[in-house]
Amino acid sequence: MIEKAILKINPNAQFTVNANDINQITWLNETTPISNADIEAMIPTVEQELKDAKTSSNYVQQRKNAYPEIGDQLDMLWHTMDKDNELQHKFYDFYQTIKKVKVAHPKK
């Protein structure tokens, strides 16, 4: 977490941290040192961002998993269109393309 807090303050910082100890930071390549107080103050922000990212990732995965398979979604669109002359006309190319396949290869 120390590393992430430092990089949040200075994305170009070059350093090492020994044993995840804030008192054992070595600043490299003339990186201006950041005070321990500033690093410690940034840690809760970094922790919250990581928590938010995980929550967001879970939300995205849950939403993705909740959708029907794409083939099922397209089939729902087809059946809706097949019952509605206005939609057949409005989306003529799509409808005719799918209809040709369904006529050529009917379900058995």
Image (cartoon, rainbow, N blue to C red):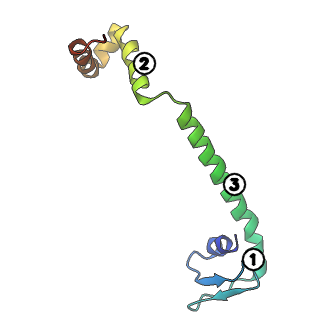
Residue farthest toward the front in the current orientation of the protein: 108
Kind of residue at badge 3: Lys
- Disc 2 element: helix
Q: Is residue 49 left or right of residue 41?
A: left
Residue with the mark numbered 2: 76
N-terminal of the pair, mark 3 or mark 2, is 3
N-terminal of the pair, mark 3 or mark 1, is 1
- Say which of marks 2 and 1 sits in front: 2
Q: Callout 2 environment at 10 Å: few (<14), some (14 to 19), or many (20+)?
A: few
- Disc 1 element: helix
Q: Nearer the viewer, residue 89 or 77?
A: 77
- Residue 1 position, x and y percent, is 70, 69
Note whether 90 is above or below 42 in the view shown.
above
Residue with the mark numbered 3: 51
Kind of residue at badge 2: Met
- Give the Cα separation between the discs numbered 2 and 1: 56 Å
Image marks 2 and 1: residues in contact by CB distance under 8 Å: no
Q: How many marks?
A: 3
Q: Callout 3 environment at 10 Å: few (<14), some (14 to 19), or many (20+)?
A: few
Location of residue 39 (image quadrant): bottom right
